[in-house]
Image: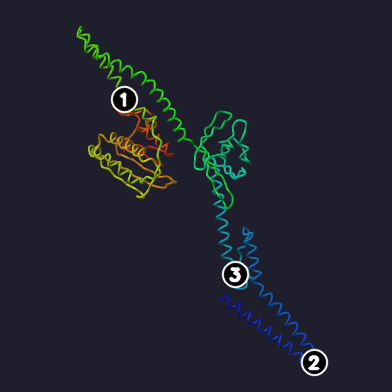
Amino acid sequence: MGSSKYSIKLFIYLVSLSLLGFGFFWSFSSSQLIITKLVIGILFLVFFLFLLKYLNKTNRDLLKFLDAIKYFENVALNDSSGLSFDKLNITYNEITNQLKDAWLAKEFQQQYFQYTLENIDVGIISFDKTGKIEILNKAAKSILGIRSLNHIDNLNTEIGQIGEELKNLVPGHSKILKVNTTIDQLSILAKLTNLKIGEKQIKLVSLQDIKTQLEQSELEAWQKLIKVLTHEIMNSVTPIKSLTYSMQKVLESANENKNLDESLIKGLNAIEKRSKGLLDFVESYKNLTQIQKPVYERVQIKSLVENVTQLMSKELEKHHITVKIEMNPEDISIIADEKLITQVIVNLILNSLKAMGGKNNKILKIESSGLEKNRVYIKVSDNGKGISPEILDKIFVPFFSTYENGSGIGLSFARQVMVLHNGRIDVQSNTEKGTVFTLSF
């Protein structure tokens, strides 16, 4: 409709201009029509200028619109009566409305990002290849004990080369940094991610809670202690066992004082038995310090779980365990050492068997879920007696066991394996509903 109206007006203006032009040249055929010539000439010039202005009006309105887009935060949303026809007017206003909405959405997203960045507990620092700081949130300032930072090299002081360490971080790998404060020395977990925004290279560093790394340090301390204990006990027990065995043979061949010999033999037998027990004890704990270095490969979780349940099938049947397996999705896989992860799951299943010892309806559930927060999870759960809250935080400590004949190394071994895989093992337990162990990769 608007286009037709525009065409009709243009047609009328062109016809009028043509008639005026014809009349103007016709008036020259008579020498007496001076006033007529003047009037027709003026009308012709006025119509010509008006038509030129009318034809250029759409271009002028488009130019105004484009200028408004250039500074589109000031785009006017009211109708422009000077637009050439109605549809163009409507289209212009629809576009300006959409641009305004897009701009407001972008502003909201920017404010939301800034608010989130300033209120999370994880410190965030980003800097370009020259070291110029792009982002520094409140948590990072608090962790580093600074008020502002313009360049990453400004973190290099006489008490530490933090800036240099941050620049030398390997992307995708974590590193524990020691940050000295006026009160104590902090251990900060730093992780670097390289970003490319357009042609600009940005280094994004997160400074965060180091619970996993502290657990790793704790485990390493236990390993050192176990190595010392193993060395000292082995050096002491081995010759005792050998000596008692030799004395036992000598006394068994002597018959002069039978009663005395029998007493000595019984005592030496007890010493030998105890010494053998100590050797077995030391041997079992020595395994904690000699975990093989993982050989990483792509492992299909479904195949892994099926192999484990097949391996444990006799034990599961013996205890009348119902096994439920859920894979979501079924083809999910991880990069891991299959042998070590198999041993971890076997240990968790053995714990579940003990926990469900007194129940009638025993259910063991193994499930996996993938790519939640860029992680893959394997859960082993049971409906056993659960673990009391008082000891829940101790179950991963080496030597600690809630069972009389338990070695106390299964869960400690599992934690070490998960740390080697840059993962975690977590537990949730309820004394009425059972226990869930979660392996996250």
First in sequence: mark 1 vs mark 3: 3
Assess disc 1: are there few (<14), some (14-19) or many (≥20) residues with their C-alpha within 10 Å of its C-alpha: few
Give residue 280's mark: 1
Q: Which residue is mark 2?
A: 31
Determine whether label 1 and label 3 are within 8 Å by CB: no
The picture places residue 396, in percent across and down from the top left corner, at: 38, 32
Q: CA distance from mark 1 to mark 3?
A: 90 Å
**Are the residues tagged 2 and 3 within 8 Å (C-beta)?**
no
Instruction: Look at mark 3 in the image and give the residue it sits on.
Output: 89
- Decide: is 106 above or below 439: below
Return the x and y of residue 90 as percentages of the image width and height. Answer: 57, 69
Q: CA distance from mark 2 to mark 3?
A: 49 Å
- Which label's residue is closer to the chain start, 2 or 3? 2
Q: How is the image coloured?
A: rainbow
Nearer the observer, 275 or 126: 275
Going by the image, does 353 lie left or right of 34?
A: left
- Give neighbour class at mark 3: few <14, some 14-19, many 20+ (Cα, 10 Å): some
Which numbered marker is on residue 422?
A: none
Front position among marks 1 and 2 = 1
Q: In front of the other: label 2 or label 3? A: 2
Picture layout, residue 74 above or below residue 169: below
Q: Secondary structure at mark 2?
A: loop
Secondary-structure class at tag 3: helix
**Dividing the image into 4 quarters, which one contains the N terminus?**
bottom right
Image x and y of residue 123, in percent: 54, 40
Residue shown at the point (63%, 79%) measured from the top left? 10
Disc 1 to disc 2, C-alpha distance? 136 Å
Q: Amino acid at mark 2?
A: Ser
Disc 1 marks a residue whose amino acid type is: Asp
Q: Quadrant of residue 156?
A: top right
Q: Quadrant of residue 134?
A: top right
Q: Position of residue 14 (x, y in %)?
A: 66, 82
